[in-house]
Image: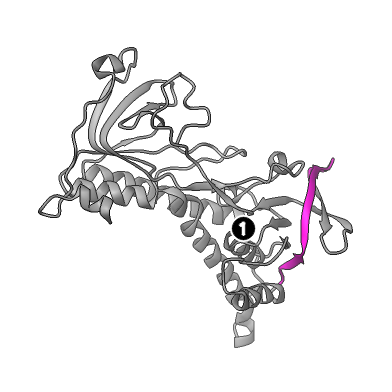
Amino acid sequence: AAAMAALLGPAGRFRWRVRAVPGGARGAAGLRGGRQCYDLLVIGGGSGGLACAKEAAQLGKKVAVVDYVEPSPRGTRWGLGGTCVNVGCIPKKLMHQAALLGGMIHDASHYGWKVAQPLHDWGKMAEAVQNHVKSLNWGHRVQLQDRKVKYFNFKASFVNPHMVCGVSKGGEETLLSADHIVIATGGRPRYPTHIEGALEYGITSDDIFWLKESPGKTLVVGASYVALECAGFLTGLGLDTTVMIRSVPLRAFDQQMASLVTEHMAVHGTRILRGCTPLRVERLSDGRLQVTWVDLASDKKDTGTFDTVLWAVAHCVSWSFFPSAPRTGNENQGRAV
């Protein structure tokens, strides 16, 4: 609250401090894109970043948004809008709706409807979901343009507390300076790299919504709401789905409700493996994945064969902030946001 009050003038509008940017004109030397100055620069084009940028623009400030999606280890990438639009709330709800429709068709015969048993086409559903998401990506770009917010699609790293260097896909560098910089980059799913084969053969929620073909028999590792939501719609779409839980489901939630959720899932066909943790993932000669896991209570090992292994174990932040570090030319390695 104190920080916000310091930025507000007597009329309740943002009061922007003007600071000299170290390096001056020489700081842009050798950069083909030159240097551009803004009142506010927002790094991250998700829900928070876009809302921040649009509100500041409505207050008459010169605003820019920088957004870049680092491809997942499987090569999945997406457009403007952040996690919710591209790999979260929106595609998840659409796929849940597809699963619910299948369930209603299945139940229809009990109410006198003479309908054939449903057969789901993952490819057709995925295409429709992805086209809808792409329309939302375009809509966000139009909204920024309407509010005169400049949009940059490149990876940015800090040069100093008031300047970032953006690198385009073609390698062109552009300096952007601003009186205020907001970091709104969110997070990305984390791979359990201590497990052999996890990174090489697994996917995460960054990939599941952009698969062109059905994931088939799927092992979901994790007990977060992301894990259970994905397992829920996969089961609802008729896929053989297993959830592997190391300790308790939905740890941060009310455990009575968490138990009701997992019991409901089990009744509706999701296999629940409790107290187990994976040890390794191997690819078989037929292309399927063999997973070896251990029961933590008995120390007994077991194996299973799956078409897809979905890691839903945790998220990590996707940025680091080094405001005082000098620019060395290697900023995009581990420091990019």
Compared with residue 279, is residue 237 higher up or lower down, i.e. above or below?
Answer: below
Query: Which amino acid type is shown beneath numbered disc 1?
Result: Asp
Q: Residue 253: which quarter of the image?
A: bottom right
**Can I make out residue 143 in this image?**
no
State the residue lying farthest toward the front: 2
For image coordinates 39% across by 29% down, the residue present is 324
Q: Which quadrant does the C terminus fall into? A: top left
Horizontal arrangement in the rendering, residue 34 relative to residue 260 (left or right): left
Residue 274 located within the stretch drawn in magenta: yes
Foreground: 131 or 2? Answer: 2
Q: Residues within 10 Å of mark 1 (few under 14, many from 20)?
A: few
Horizontal and vertical percent position of residue 334: 53, 31
- Residue drawn at x 62%, y 64% is 228
The answer to whether residue 45 is visible is: yes
Residue 7 percent across, percent down from the top left: 21, 47
Q: In terms of depth relative to the viewer, which is nearer, 87 or 50?
A: 50
Residue 163 picture location, percent across and down: 32, 29
Q: Is residue 123 left or right of residue 278?
A: left
In the rendered image, which residue does mark 1 sit on?
A: 121
Q: Secondary structure at mark 1?
A: loop
296 displayed left or right of 93 = right
Q: Main secondary structure of the magenta part?
A: strand
Q: Position of residue 108 (x, y in %)?
A: 60, 81
Instruction: Locate residue 325: give its quadrant.
Output: top left
Q: Which residues are magenta?
A: 269-289
Q: Could you tell me which quadrant the N terminus lies in?
A: bottom left
Q: Residue at x 80, y 42 (%)?
A: 283
The answer to whether residue 331 is magenta is no
Q: Give the answer, above or below, for where 100 lies relative to 136.
A: below
User: Which is more toward the observer, 248 or 61?
Assistant: 248
Q: Residue furthest bottom?
A: 111
